[in-house]
Amino acid sequence: MNEPSSTPRDDSPDARASRTYEGWISVFESSTDFEADLVRDRLDEEEIAAVVLTQRDHAFNLTVGDLAPVHVMVRPEDEQAARALLDSVQLTDEELEAAAMAADVMAPDAHGPSDEARLDSGIDEISLSVPEDEDDEDA
């Protein structure tokens, strides 16, 4: 695991547009939800707001490689910090094994089910209010 698996950095306008959704930018792409959740949690630890955008078909639990990507999305102003964090030196297998062996398997979950759902949805970072109609002001 020497190279980071974040989205390749082709910064052409077309490539950037394909990694953008409603103003959020993809900084990591995977074919599994749990890998994206780990990345999202790591960004959250550094107080970088991130949401998981999955294009997988959960009804049939199908994973079709590149046809069903799972993205970790951040706001444009957090993109550089997120990429720097994800591209930083990764832990070795020995360090990961030591951390896993030292973990308390009986420890309570870091988040309850409702908090986990809130983090997964990104509801704290989006507005569900109805946009104001600019035409009404002119009338």
Image (cartoon, grey):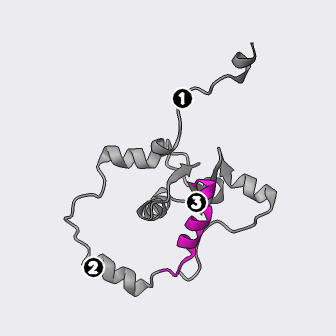
- Is disc 3 surrounded by few (<14), some (14 to 19) or many (20+) residues within 10 Å? some
Q: Nearer the viewer, residue 44 or 100?
A: 44
Q: Nearer the viewer, residue 55 or 73?
A: 73
For the residues labelled 2 and 1, the Cα–Cα distance comes to 46 Å
The residue at 62%/66% (across/down) is: 80
Labels 3 and 1 touching (C-beta < 8 A)? no
For the residues labelled 3 and 2, the Cα–Cα distance comes to 33 Å
Q: Is residue 19 left or right of residue 53?
A: right
The x and y percentages for residue 120 are 44, 48
- Magenta portion: prevailing SS class: helix
Q: Which residue is mark 1?
A: 129
Q: Which residues are magenta?
A: 74-90
Q: Which residue is mark 2?
A: 101
Question: Identity of the amino acid at label 3?
Answer: Asp
Viewer-nearest of discs 2 and 1: 1
Q: Is residue 100 magenta?
A: no
Question: Identity of the amino acid at label 1?
Answer: Ser
Q: Which residue is mark 3?
A: 78
The residue at 74%/57% (across/down) is: 16
Labels 3 and 2 touching (C-beta < 8 A)? no
| Sequence-first disc among 3 and 1 | 3
